[in-house]
Amino acid sequence: MAVFTEVSQDDARDLAAKLALGEVRELRGIQGGIENTNYFLTTSTGEFVLTLFERLSFEQLPFYLHLMKHLAAHAIPVPEPHATPGSATADNPDGRLLQTVCGKPAAVVGKLRGKSELAPTAVHCAAVGDMLARMHLAGRDYPHMQPNLRGLAWWNETVPVVLEHTTPEQSALLKGELALQNHVAASSAYAALPCGPIHADLFRDNVMFDDGELTGFFDFYFAGVDTWLFDIAVCLNDWCIDLATGRQDDARTQAFLRAYNAVRPLAAAERQLLPVMLRAGALRFWISRLWDLHLPREASMLKAHDPTHFERVLRQRVAQAYRTL
Ligand SMILES: Nc1ncnc2c1ncn2[C@@H]1O[C@H](COP(=O)(O)OP(=O)(O)O)[C@@H](O)[C@H]1O
Ligand SMILES: N[C@@H](CCOP(=O)(O)O)C(=O)O
């Protein structure tokens, strides 16, 4: 369970009162997740998720919380953050969404129905592709800007730190792929890629399904403004591969891309750069998993994800790119 900060019943009662959520019935630490402290909060008015942000600052958080509000208002199924009653102003029509609990930035959002689909079929992948395209379009008029904080600049900073913990073969692959991504990012094809707010971490465990129906995307706290293609690549690398080998599953990949394309057709530059973006998506999570494993934080029962999984995915994507050349 990733509970970095213990929240008391008194803290929960104070927060529920402040947000007019009613009487607290239950507060339960959530298993899973590796970034933040999460609790299920049940009150007399409903079920919510309380998140205490362990890395993001008070200044960074409004981007994510207002993005969730914006997407919800555009009929994208995402958890809606709760505002302090009466805090809306002409400048800030969403009201105050960010709270302080145990001295940390915190938010209360609605609890989504259902559970994650960890062994998705082509039908699940199509549902995610369709909704991702809708989400990208819905984000076009989102007025706030914050870059993807786990984008290229972070990879450039973090690779030298994790290289101390890798074998010579792994180091060579990391350095080579990083050089490639820096080169691609400077290209005219890359500059032509459409951008907007992206989720950037839309793995199987960040989507809910209930009885086959997609009930929501959640965990927007790695979101940022970046290329839409990066979001697609992150999804394809998690939803549409064989998990044991990291190999692409063609049926699920086609189902995802067809559904996405039916809502928002991919641009020529996106088709051209998809193979290299799949490598970028794998590199991103290989780096962060190495970083989380070798530079861990204190948390009750925090279980780091396995970095070698994304090394395998990356090697498959490299081999695949050579096959398609
Ligand atoms: N809005 C939500 N509705 C329902 N369950 C949620 C919601 N937010 C989080 N959860 C549950 O909490 C778990 C951990 O949340 P997650 O956001 O992935 O953690 P982290 O912030 O550490 O990445 C999820 O796997 C899910 O079971
Ligand atoms: N999805 C990422 C890391 C973030 O994990 P989460 O469970 O907190 O969303 C990975 O798998 O490496």
Image (cartoon, rainbow, N blue to C red):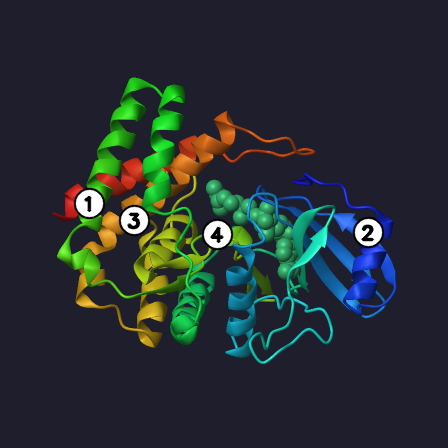
Instruction: Decide which of 319, 251 is in the foreground and name it.
Output: 319
Q: Amino acid at mark 1?
A: Ala
Earlier in the chain: of badge 2 and badge 4, it is 2
Q: Amino acid at mark 4?
A: Phe
Q: Of helix, strand and loop, which one carries label 4?
A: loop
Q: Amino acid at mark 2?
A: Asp
Which is more foreground, mark 2 or mark 3?
2
Earlier in the chain: of badge 2 and badge 3, it is 2
Which is more foreground, mark 1 or mark 2?
2
Which is more foreground, mark 2 or mark 4?
2
Q: Are marks 1 and 2 in contact (CB under 8 Å)?
A: no
x, y percent for residue 121? 46, 58
x, y percent for residue 50? 70, 55
**10 Å crowding of disc 1: few (<14), some (14-19), many (20+):** some
Instruction: Name which residue lies at 30% across and 45% down.
Output: 280
Figure quadrant of residue 4: top right
Residue 246 visible? The answer is no
**Where the N terminus falls, by quadrant?**
top right
Q: CA distance from mark 2 to mark 3?
A: 43 Å
Q: Are marks 1 and 3 in contact (CB under 8 Å)?
A: yes
Which is more foreground, mark 3 or mark 4?
4
Instruction: Name which residue lies at 25% across and 68% down.
Output: 266
Residue, disc 3: 278
Residue, disc 4: 222
Which is more foreground, mark 4 or mark 1?
4
Which is more foreground, mark 1 or mark 3?
3
Earlier in the chain: of badge 4 and badge 1, it is 4
Earlier in the chain: of badge 1 and badge 3, it is 3
x, y percent for residue 41? 77, 57
**In this rendering, position of residue 217 left or right of residue 42:** left
